[in-house]
Image (tube, rainbow, N blue to C red):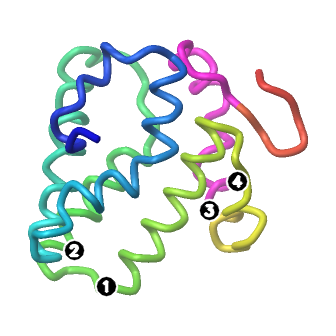
Amino acid sequence: MKPVYEVDFPALSGEEKVKFMHDLRDNMAESFQKQPVSVQILAHALIFTRWWNSYQHMAPKEPAPEILGIATDLLWDFLEGKCGKDEFARFQQSFSDSALEILTGDDGGLNEDPESDAFSNKIFYPLENFVLQRVPLLPVHRAGGCCL
């Protein structure tokens, strides 16, 4: 497997993108496993911030989900010592469970973790129309329903 930072995401097929997103947490861990935790978190922050800044630059007038700004701010707050490890880990778990369900239909994390499910309903599902309009290459799923 290539390190996550060497993957050319736009060049992947739709199926490869789904697999990439499904395996992202494990791939990130493997790509940076020999690095200290502080470097791992910094890598997450830099990769995500780079993507977020690129998106804002490419589509400045497009609406963007509030969660993207929240995630970026929380990553940097954690790195700067402004939020604790437990708060950061809780956010990361809820975000990962929610994203996995939206992008692949795997709702196991949401079913097993009431906090992740509440997070998903509060943050993501008011944005369902945004996701449907903006991510046409990936199927959008919702627990108990079909691929939209």
Would you say residue 113 sits in the magenta stretch?
A: no
Mark 4 and mark 2: Cα distance apart in space: 24 Å
Q: Residues within 10 Å of mark 2 (few under 14, many from 20)?
A: some
Q: Are marks 4 and 3 in contact (CB under 8 Å)?
A: yes
| In this rendering, position of residue 43 left or right of residue 134 | left
> Distance from label 1 to label 4 (Cα)?
24 Å
Image quadrant assignment for residue 145: top right
Extent of the magenta region: 119-140
Query: Relative to 72, is 29 above or below?
Result: below
Q: Secondary structure at mark 2?
A: helix
Which residue bears the numbered disc 1?
85
- The percent position of residue 86, horizontal first and vertical second, equals 39, 86
Tell me the SS state at disc 3.
helix
Tell whether label 1 touches label 2 (CB within 8 Å): yes
Indicate the quadrant containing the N terminus: top left, top right, bottom left or bottom right: top left
* Sooner in the amino-acid sequence: mark 3 or mark 2: 2
How far apart marks 1 and 3 lie (CA) works out to 18 Å
Of marks 1 and 3, the one in the foreground = 1
Q: Which residue is mark 3?
A: 119
Query: How far apart are the alpha carbons under marks 4 and 3?
Result: 6 Å
Say the numbered circle drawn on residue 78.
2
